[in-house]
Image (cartoon, helix red, strand yellow):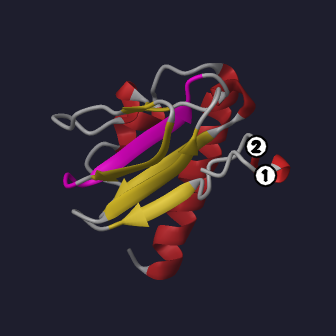
């Protein structure tokens, strides 16, 4: 996340992130009104949800394969969201696609799923 530049003010960078189990993910600039949290209904079972508030840098490791949704607590309605795919879209992509979200976030996540599926087919992953 880069909340310090105007063009990225409501944007999580990158909106789709593919990592391997155990890779570290760095969240930076979670300041002021930009507080990042896991979308519980888009979170792999057994993985501890996260909540980043007022931290310049926060590092997480996701070790369970699947799809993980993140959003700004305040600005998810402005599509300030991100999707992290650990190893593969399975096993929880079907559940995450039906997550209970506001309309704008649901629409934005749906676009990310389409992009992620295209990337997977293009790169054979």
Q: Is residue 118 above or below residue 49?
A: below
Classify mark 2: helix, strand or loop: loop
Spatial separation of the CA atoms under disc 1 and disc 2: 6 Å
Label 2 CA crowd tier, 10 Å (few <14, some 14–19, many 20+): some
**Residue drawn at 56 percent across, 24 percent down:** 73
Classify mark 1: helix, strand or loop: loop
Q: Along the line of sight, which residue is nearer the eye, 35 or 56?
A: 56
Q: Position of residue 108 (x, y in %)?
A: 66, 39
**Residue drawn at 49 percent across, 48 percent down:** 83
Label 1 CA crowd tier, 10 Å (few <14, some 14–19, many 20+): few
Q: Which of the image's four quarters has the C terminus?
A: bottom left
Q: Is residue 39 magenta?
A: no
Q: Position of residue 72 (x, y in %)?
A: 58, 31
Secondary structure character of the magenta stretch overall: strand
Question: What is the count of numbered marks?
Answer: 2
Q: Is residue 75 above or below residue 82?
A: above
Q: Is residue 123 left or right of residue 46?
A: right
**Residue drawn at 30 percent across, 31 percent down:** 49
Q: Position of residue 47 (x, y in %)?
A: 21, 38
Closest to the camera, between mark 1 and mark 2, is: 1
Question: In this picture, which residue range is highlighted in magenta?
Answer: 63-73
- Residue indicated by mark 1: 5
- Is disc 1 in contact with disc 2, using a CB cutoff of under 8 Å? yes
**Residue drawn at 41 percent across, 35 percent down:** 96
- Residue indicated by mark 2: 9
Furthest residue in direction bottom, as rendered: 123
Q: Along the line of sight, which residue is nearer the eye, 125 or 87?
A: 87
Q: Residue 35 falls in which quadrant of the image?
A: top right
Q: Residue 81 falls in which quadrant of the image?
A: top right
Q: Position of residue 80 (x, y in %)?
A: 65, 38
Specify the label residue 124 is tagged with.
none
Q: Is residue 69 magenta?
A: yes
């Amino acid at each position: 996340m880069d909340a310090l530049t105007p063009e990225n003010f409501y944007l999580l960078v990158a909106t789709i992130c593919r990592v391997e189990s155990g890779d570290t993910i760095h969240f930076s600039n979670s300041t002021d009104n930009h507080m990042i949290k896991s979308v519980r209904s888009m979170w792999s079972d057994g993985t501890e949800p996260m909540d980043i508030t007022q931290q310049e840098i926060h590092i997480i490791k996701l070790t369970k394969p699947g799809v993980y949704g993140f959003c700004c607590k305040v600005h998810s309605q402005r599509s300030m969201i991100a999707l992290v795919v650990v190893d593969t879209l399975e096993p929880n992509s079907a559940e995450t696609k039906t997550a209970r979200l506001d309309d704008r976030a649901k629409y934005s996540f749906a676009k990310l799923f389409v992009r992620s599926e295209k990337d997977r087919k293009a790169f054979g992953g």
